[in-house]
Amino acid sequence: MKKIISIVSMLSMACGFSFSQSLQDGIKAMDNENYYTAKKILLDITTKNPANSEALYYTGKVFYILDQKDSAKIFFDKGIVANAKFSYNYVGLGRFYLDQANAVDAKTNFDKATSLNSKDVKTLQLIGEAYANVPTKPNTDNKSAQDGITVLEKALSIDKKNPNTFLMLGDAYMSKWDGAGQAVTNYEYAAQYSQSTLAAQAFCRIGVLYAKAKNYNEALSGFQKSLAADSLFAPAHRELGELYYQSKQYTKARDTYKKYMSLADATIENQSRYASFLFLAKDYETTITMINNVIEKNPSNFILSRLIAYSYYEEGKYKEGLDYIEKFFKQVDSKKILASDYEYYGKLLSKNGNDSLAIINLNLCMTMDTSKAELHGDIAQMYYKKKKYADAAHEFVLKMAKIKPNVQDYFQVGKCYYYAEQYSKSDSAFIKVTELSPNSQVGFLWRGRCNSNIDSTGAQQLAKPFYEKCVELASVDVTKNKKDIIESYKYLGWLSIQNNKDAEGIDYYKKVLELDPADEQAKSVVNDAKKINGSKSKS
């Protein structure tokens, strides 16, 4: 019998130890901002032990953080029923009412909490935390922050080196418009008087504060110190990843966020953010694999449909990309469409053979984001492919008006004008090509072509100097440039004959045959000349 009692006693102790650890695990998960994990742990505890008022408080708190405030209130009420002398749940109710802008009921519950034990530091900390976290609009002062500071200073008078009090004081000052300096000071005290996770929290908050102030080096230092204090503190990995993202270090952002993902709840928000970093790091294959796994569980997530469509385009899988971008446009609120959505939609449509609709979407992109002027070049190429050369030239001109043109831009617009039979405009473009690339024969060849059309009879010999310059420059590498040299010789030969310089013209055609003995036109001209000369000698 004694043996059985001993075993029961040991099991009871083990259960108590397990329960205690589980509650601490839930709190630890909350500190790591793994709120869904914490919720699961805490609900399991309160299901098994519905009278545990402390577990009920933390369960209510995690529901509150997850913005399920009515559910939070239910647990705070249960906690008070379970133990009316346990102060935390009154604080929870006070926070609930504070959030509802019901200052009277909030104070009533806070006063009830402190009346149970006016010197309980933890209770004062939780009240201070409630005041520090009153919801406010972005970049606005928290009017309740000073009330939180007053309560926390009282807690500090009871325990002058309590790191949690300094941490909460930092949060309270952080929520004030001009409290950043005091916030850093209190976070530093919190780190000084603590170890491990709490120090990690303090340094991480310092990093966040400096990141908001665009002070990269101090932010980086804060996050590094946070991870030195606790390498498994998930929020520091997340915030460090965000810092790398802000500084456009996308590979570092991806790798850091990957570590965060191994420590954090696999929420849709976290996975979507990680997918963004994978995409920006140009790790498209991994982006596709990860998103496909997530979409199976949440097919309505339009952000993931967007990213996977982008990634399929970058991987050259245009059919799959078009399927997803069209699904995205069906899912998304029109107010949430980005310029890049129209850009990728347009590019995917073009790759799938629908240039007309592609042009519409690329223009929508540029309407939303005027910095995307390079897309005029994409539209120009689509018009060029359709042989709408004047439209193509117009798009290139629009691009060149907004982005400093290079030699390739002038070359492209010159070609468009040429095929649109606007030879003077084409020639003007190729003048710029020759100026920007004076050692290449290409610009001079095209100038020859333009001027041969302007001076179609050769009477003014406008094209002659450009074809001659083409031969001069192309002769540096005859094998490579043979085609351009032959074209130039043929024109120069024709021009000579047009101007009654037959012998000179025949010499040019002979040079053509030296480069290409099979050229039919050159053979015909040379043979005809031989016949004429033969007839003259007989007579």
Image: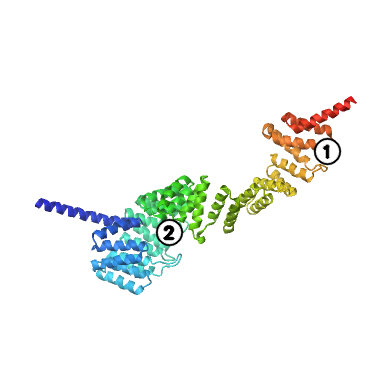
Image quadrant holding the C terminus, namely top right
Q: Position of residue 498 (x, y in %)?
A: 83, 38
Along the polypeptide, which appears first: circle 1 or circle 2? 2
Q: Is residue 210 at least partly visible in the picture?
A: yes
Report helix, strand or loop for mark 2.
helix
Left or right placement of residue 522 versus residue 357 in this view:
right
Amino acid under label 1?
Gln
Q: Residue 430 got which mark?
A: none
Q: Residues within 10 Å of mark 2 (few under 14, many from 20)?
A: many
Q: Is residue 249 at least partly visible in the picture?
A: no
Disc 1/disc 2 C-alpha distance (Å):
81 Å
Q: Residues within 10 Å of mark 1 (few under 14, many from 20)?
A: some
Left or right placement of residue 249 versus residue 533 in this view:
left
Q: Position of residue 230 (x, y in %)?
A: 34, 51
Report helix, strand or loop for mark 1.
helix
Amino acid under label 2?
Leu
User: In the depicted view, which residue is nearer to us: 438 or 464?
Assistant: 464
Q: Residue 209 got which mark?
A: 2
Q: In which image quadrant can residue 37 be found?
A: bottom left
Q: In which image quadrant can residue 157 be found?
A: bottom left
Residue displayed at 73% across by 46% down: 427
Total tally of numbered discs in the picture? 2
Q: Are marks 1 and 2 in contact (CB under 8 Å)?
A: no
Residue displayed at 72% across by 40% down: 445
Mark 1 or 2, closer to the camera: 1
Where does label 1 land, which residue? 498
In the image as oriented, which residue stretches furthest toward the right?
A: 539
User: In the depicted view, which residue is nearer to us: 359 or 129?
Assistant: 359
Q: Position of residue 494 (x, y in %)?
A: 79, 37
In the image as oriented, which residue stretches furthest toward the top?
A: 538
User: In the depicted view, which residue is nearer to us: 516 or 133?
Assistant: 516
Left or right placement of residue 93 versus residue 398 in this view:
left
